[in-house]
Amino acid sequence: MDDVIVRAAETDEELRQANDLMAKAHFSDYWEGAEWVGPQGMGYPGFRREHVRIALHRGQVAAALRLTTDTIRVGEARLKMAGFGCVTTDKAYRRRGLTSLVMDDAMHYLREHRFHAAMLFGIPDFYHRWGFATALAEYATVIHLRDASPETAPACRIRKIKPGDIPAVQRMHAANDEETACSLVRSAAHISNKWARWENARVLIDEKGRVTAYLRGRPDGTDYLVDEAGVAGYDACPALIRAAARLARAECAGRVKFLAPPSHPVIRHLLAFRADHAMRTDRNANGMLAVVDTGEALESLVPEWERLLAGGAGGDAEVTLVVDRRPWRVRALRGAVDVAAASGRNKIPLNARELAQLIAGYRHPEEVLHDRIPPSRGDGPVFLRTLFPKRVPFVWAADRF
Ligand SMILES: CC(C)(COP(=O)(O)OP(=O)(O)OC[C@H]1O[C@@H](n2cnc3c(N)ncnc32)[C@H](O)[C@@H]1OP(=O)(O)O)[C@@H](O)C(=O)NCCC(=O)NCCS
């Protein structure tokens, strides 16, 4: 297409047009969408106007997307991540390559700003072109109210959340999420920014007045859907289950459905109950991760790799990850790991999409690379398994973009 300019939104008018286009395409309630991309989105921690990327055709915004910038955890490692949201081309311009141009431009912007990874929740068979691979599963644990009565639940008061509870909620969330990979590292500002979506959450208060648990729920057909919960410790789980059942009963729901990963304490606690635990995986769709800058991403994993090696048998080891034909040597010497853009021993060819899945811990390394690691190759396979253990990657509904 001629006369197309692709870049960041610069003027107020470009931003207004881009926000309008995104709100109309992505929300059944336009005003909710306008708030999401407008005041709320622009007040999101770290937001900059240049995070809205647009294609302009003769002065009109014909395609747009917005980036949100966050930090994600992978064990001890912290990765600089950008989330793609509201990717849209105006109906009149679709299938003419505009979103492709805006995606190319956004990926270029992220590389320039040394992001490690990018994430999105996407339509099928579209985003693989930019290196995105499905790397996040969905989880649901369902318990019938008749099965949700813990025999011993400490007496707790339940009340609506207040802004003053944010630090306690944030602390519980961070502690509960330690074993969840790819989840966003939240600050209090992340919750305040989305307060409209939090203000109906509930907190549980023990007899000493401490906040010991929280949950965010709403009726959903015959279920009471809890898309986030947290506890100060395992001993708060029975009261939390009882509170969820009480709220469900008040809404005439027959079941409570928790949308939380199996690594979360509340879901672990539910293993002692009669419940249905479901995991939904996808292919080339939904929760996807891309490695933006391979060197930076591998470098950012070093603290986690050193922790993993400290817990293992130790010893020196080396592997060369040949990512899309470019070698990256990962070497452990006396427990210290270094990454270099160089060739070395134990070469394993893989592509960037496979690397994204391995970093997230979404798939087992032996399964992804089984046809590329001959079993007799010395320390390589063991080292590779240590570097990329199976994890539980998940992003909470409240954090999605
Ligand atoms: C999806 C959407 C952004 C595509 O925009 P577009 O400008 O038409 O996309 P492009 O013309 O750049 O298409 C790029 C490629 O994707 C393909 N494609 C386009 N729309 C697609 C879709 N909905 N699903 C799968 N593939 C699609 C094109 O055929 C093209 O393939 P090619 O490179 O092999 O020729 C646009 O249809 C849209 O705004 N839809 C409504 C909002 C939406 O669903 N956004 C995605 C949210 S995750």
Image (cartoon, helix red, strand yellow):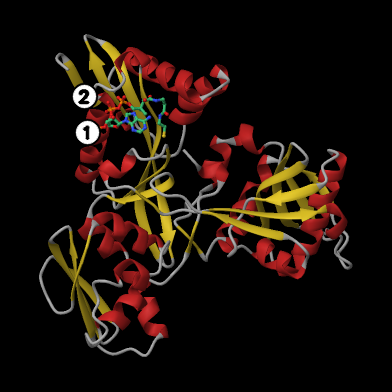
Q: Residue 338 in the image: x percent, y percent?
A: 21, 73
Q: Residue 195 in the image: x percent, y percent?
A: 61, 35
Q: Which residue is mark 1?
A: 105
Q: Pointer 2 and pointer 1: residues touching (CB < 8 Å)?
A: yes
Q: Which residue is mark 2?
A: 6
Secondary structure beneath dot 2 equals strand
Examine the image and state in which quarter residue 232 appears: bottom right
Residue type, label 2: Val
Q: Residue 194 in the image: x percent, y percent?
A: 57, 36
Q: Is residue 14 visible?
A: yes
Residue type, label 1: Asp
In the rendered view, tell whether residue 390 sits above or below residue 13.
below
Residue 108 located left or right of residue 151: left
Residue 128 located left or right of residue 361: left
Instruction: Find ligand 1 in the image and state its quadrant.
Output: top left
How much space separates mark 2 and mark 1, taking CA atoms?
7 Å
Residue 275 located left or right of residue 323: right
* Circle 1 Cα neighbour tier, 10 Å, few/some/many (<14 / 14–19 / ≥20): some
Looking at the rendering, in which quadrant would you find the N terminus?
top left
In the rendered view, tell whether residue 2 sits above or below residue 332.
above
Secondary structure beneath dot 1 equals helix
